[in-house]
Image: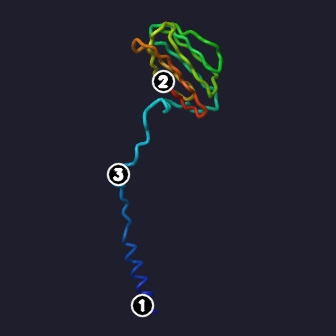
Amino acid sequence: MKLPILATAVLTTALSFVTPTITNAANPPARTYQPGYWQPVARVKNPNEPIQIKLVNQTGLPLQYGLTSGKGGIGELPIGGSAVISNTSVPDYLLVNALQQRVKLRDDIAVDGNVVTVQIYQVEAGASDITLNFDESGAVYVY
């Protein structure tokens, strides 16, 4: 009877000195991020609160913009000008296009809380408008 108790005590003591070793997997973790239009470029802080969109025209050309919800109507953005669309709610789309034909646009987007600033540039000749998607989760997509 003393032998099983002694064996248990020795085994318990021996196992207490063994520390588990954490090993990394031989293969690195999978990279699931794939860049593309389906990835949000920004995210507003609280999509349940109103969103303010500030447009800044850096193209040297007059632009036209509007929300697909129709809120605020269609606006014109003069050369070097800026505009603010206040109290926007999600989901909504913002469309921006040049008033001249064959103008290719690109944008830079910055978010501070629920304020989205969109800098608009002309990159080269061609045809390309900008569409921003503000979805229910607060993500901002560019198409």
Q: Quadrant of residue 24?
A: bottom left
Task: Please state which of residues 2 and 39 is positioned toward the viewer in this rendering.
Answer: 39
**Which circle, 2 or 3, is nearer the viewer?**
3
Residue drawn at point x = 56 percent, y = 25 percent = 115
Q: Residue 109: which disc?
A: 2
* Mark 3 residue element: loop
Which residue position holds label 1?
3
* Mark 1 residue element: helix
Whether label 1 touches label 3, CB < 8 Å? no
Residue drawn at point x = 45 percent, y = 22 percent = 108
**Which circle, 1 or 3, is nearer the viewer?**
3
Which residue position holds label 3?
27
How many marks do you count on the picture?
Answer: 3
Amino acid type for the residue under numbered disc 3: Asn
Image x and y of residue 63, in percent: 52, 10
Seen in the picture, residue 18 relative to 89 is either above or below; the reply is: below
